Amino acid sequence: MRAIFFTVFGVFMAVSSAWGVSVDIYAVCRLDPNGDNFLALRDQPDVRSRMLLKLPAGTRIEEWGRVGNWMQVDVEAEGRPSGYVHASYTCLVEDH
């Protein structure tokens, strides 16, 4: 089921980009320098889900949607990984 979701999600993102759909750009911020000092990119909007990447402060992400306090995002990096991050550790950079 997850494979189908991510395939459909990937097609949606490619079509949205081709159609020029604007998304809001955020940056990872408000991390605790005395803590882990990264934001986890997760495969589902849940703290117990698999961590895909550790995003350091300043990492730019594109928001595609929300599930409660979680943002569905693409990471602005080579390979453009996608997943979920907790919104409380993001700061709006570009509002579209």
Image (spheres, rainbow, N blue to C red):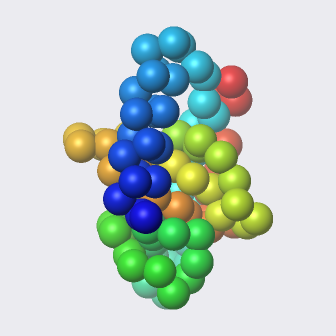
Give the farthest residue toward the top: 19
Left or right of 90 on screen, residue 78? left
Residue 22 vertical position relative to residue 54 in the rendered view, above or below: above
Q: Residue at x 52, y 61 (%)?
A: 84
**Which of the image's four quarters has the N terminus?**
bottom left
The location of residue 6, given as percent across then percent down, is 40, 52
- Say whether residue 37 is visible: yes
The location of residue 49, given as percent across then percent down, is 47, 80
Q: Residue at x 68, y 24 (%)?
A: 96
Left or right of 10 on screen, residue 62? right
Left or right of 45 on screen, residue 88? right
Residue 7 vertical position relative to residue 84 in the rendered view, above or below: above
Left or right of 86 on screen, residue 8? left
Q: Residue at x 44, y 42 (%)?
A: 8
Count of residue discs: 0
Q: Residue at x 58, y 78 (%)?
A: 46
The one of 46 and 38 positioned closer to us in this rendering = 46
Q: For residue 94, what is the image quadrant?
A: top right
The location of residue 91, given as percent across then percent down, is 65, 50
- Say whether residue 87 is visible: no
Residue 96 vertical position relative to residue 29 in the rendered view, above or below: above
Residue 18 vertical position relative to residue 25 in the rendered view, above or below: above
The one of 84 and 34 positioned closer to us in this rendering = 84
Give the farthest residue toward the right: 68
The location of residue 71, given as percent across then percent down, is 62, 56
